[in-house]
Amino acid sequence: MNQLKVGFGRANITPPMGINVSGYFVKRKAEGVLDQLEANAVAICDGKTTVLLIALDLLGLVQGCAPKFIDAISQKTGLSKESIFVHCTHTHTGPDLGVVDGEDAQKLVDDNRDFLISRCIDVAHFALNDLKPAKMGYGVAKAPNIAFIRRYRMKDGSVKTNPGVLNPDILHPIGEIDDTVNVIRFDRENAETVVLANFGCHPDTVGGNLISGDWPTLTRHFVEKAIDNTKCIFFNGAQGDVNHVNVHPTKGDFNDMFNDFDGCSRGYGHARHMGRVVAGAVMQVYDKVNYVEDSEIKCLQKTYDIPSNKPDPKDLPLARKYYQLHLDGKDDEIPYKAMMLTTVLANARRMIRLEHGPENFQLTFSAIRLGKVALFGIPGEPFNGIGKGIKQTEGYDLIMPCCLVNGYNGYFPMQDSYDEGGYEASTSIFKAGVAEKIIVCGQEMLTEIK
C-alpha cells in the first residue's frame, strides 16, 4: 500500500542591499533586486523514512558553511543528517557567503548567513508540517539550444573556456551537451501538486549588481504561472563545463544580450528565455508522467578522500605576483584580459591556497532513492561527463545528478580537461582523476541503496 506523503515550503531569502555579490573576480555590491531569492523545500515520507530536499537561490555553501546549515536543520527538525539534501542553484547574482574585505562588509555577510540558516529551518518546518498523502510520477523531456559546452578547441590546438562570441579561432566544442530535463511530479490529496525539475547549466546569465535567481528562479515562476495549483522546486545538474553562451549566434539568438566584461554574452532577457524553455520542457511531460507504486525511500551519505591539486613550487612566485596585483586593484598590469584574466587569477588563488597542502580533501556525497528514481548530490561543480556516467547506474528508471549539494568545493573536471588545459582544470583544487572517482562513488552508492 502506498504510504507516500509530500510537503512543500517556501521562504524569501533576498539579502540586504550593499552586500557583496558572489560569482566573479570583480567586486560587486548589491544595488537592487530583479527577482526575490527563495528557499524552497520538499519533505518526502514513505511511512518509515523522511527526507528533506532544500534548494536555495545561492552560488553555493562555501567551505565550512555547509555543516552549520546541516547541523542546525538536523537539530531543529530531528532528522538525521544523511536525510538532509541542501542544494544551491548557483546563481551568480546572489549574496557572498565567504570572507570579504572590510569589517562592515563582513558583518553584513555574517548576519545574512545566520539569516539564511534560520530561513532554512523555517522552510524545513513548513514542508514537514505540510505533509499530505501523495502519488509520484516521473518524466523526461529536452530543453534544446540553451546550454552549451563552454570548453573549445582552438585553431592553434589550444583549449579555451569561454573564448568569446564569434571568435574566428574556434574550431569546435569539446564534448556533447546533455539537454535532458528530468521531472518528478507529486500529486497530493487536497493540496497543490509539487513538481521537482532538474537540468544542468550555469546560471550566469544576468550579470551586473542586481540580485536575481537567474533562469532557475524564472523556471519555477513560469511553471507555476502555467499550471494552476502547482509548486515547483528546481535542482541544477552537472553544469561544471556547461553554460548559456552560444559562441555562434544566428538570427535572433543574440536578442536581449550584450557582451560583458569577460567576453561572455549576458542579459536578463536571455535568463527569461531560458526559464521559459526549461519550463516548457516540464510542461511537455507534466500530464504524461509515468506514475509508479514503488516510492520506498532510502538515503545514504558517504565521505571519500580525494587527492588535492598541489602546485609546483616553481610556479608560486608568479602566482603570488599576479594575485597581489589583483588585490591591489591593478588588473591592468597583468598581461591577460577577459576570461584568460579570470583563469590566471583563479589558478593563482588555487596555488597559493594549496602551497602547504593538504594532501587530500574529504568530500561527502549524498544519495536518495525514491523507488526507482534517485537523486545524487555532489558538493561542487561536476562536469557534464560526471552526470552522464552516474546516470548509467543500473537498476533505476531515472537518476538526477545534482550539483552543489551540502557544500561547495569548486570544479570536478574530467581527465581530458587536465590533459588539454582550460579554466576549470587549472583552477580545480583536486588532482586529475577526480571526475572518474566521483562516477565510481556515485554508482557504488546508488547500487548500495538500490
Image (cartoon, helix red, strand yellow):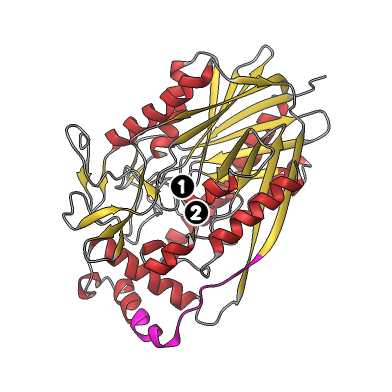
Task: Count residues near mark 2 (Cα–Cα under 10 Å), then give few for <14, some for 14-19, many for 20+.
Answer: many
310 falls in the magenta region:
yes
Q: Earlier in the sequence, mark 1 or mark 2?
A: 1
Query: Residue at image x 69%, y 13%?
Result: 189
In-image side of 78 versus 228 (left or right): right
308 falls in the magenta region:
yes
Residue in the foreground of this view, choosing between 247 and 258: 247
Looking at the rendered image, the quarter that the N terminus falls into is: top right
| Real-space CA distance between mark 1 and mark 2, rounded to the nearest whole angstrom | 9 Å
Residue 267 is drawn in which quadrant?
A: top left
Question: Percent position (x, y) of residue 149?
Answer: 36, 49
Q: Which mark is residue 388?
A: none
Residue bearing mark 2: 381
Say if mark 1 contacts mark 2, CB within 8 Å: yes
Up-down: is 319 above or below 127?
below
The reply to whether residue 95 is in sight is: yes
Residue in the foreground of this view, choosing between 35 and 404: 404
Query: Residue at image x 48%, y 41%?
Result: 57
* Secondary structure of residue under mark 2: strand
Question: Percent position (x, y) of residue 110?
Answer: 53, 56
The reply to whether residue 71 is in sight is: no
Label 1 amino acid?
His
Question: Percent position (x, y) of residue 3?
Answer: 79, 22
Give the residues drawn in magenta, as a range: 305-320
Q: Which mark is residue 90?
A: 1
Query: Residue at image x 27%, y 70%?
Result: 329
Task: Count residues near mark 1 (Cα–Cα under 10 Å), then give few for <14, some for 14-19, many for 20+.
Answer: many
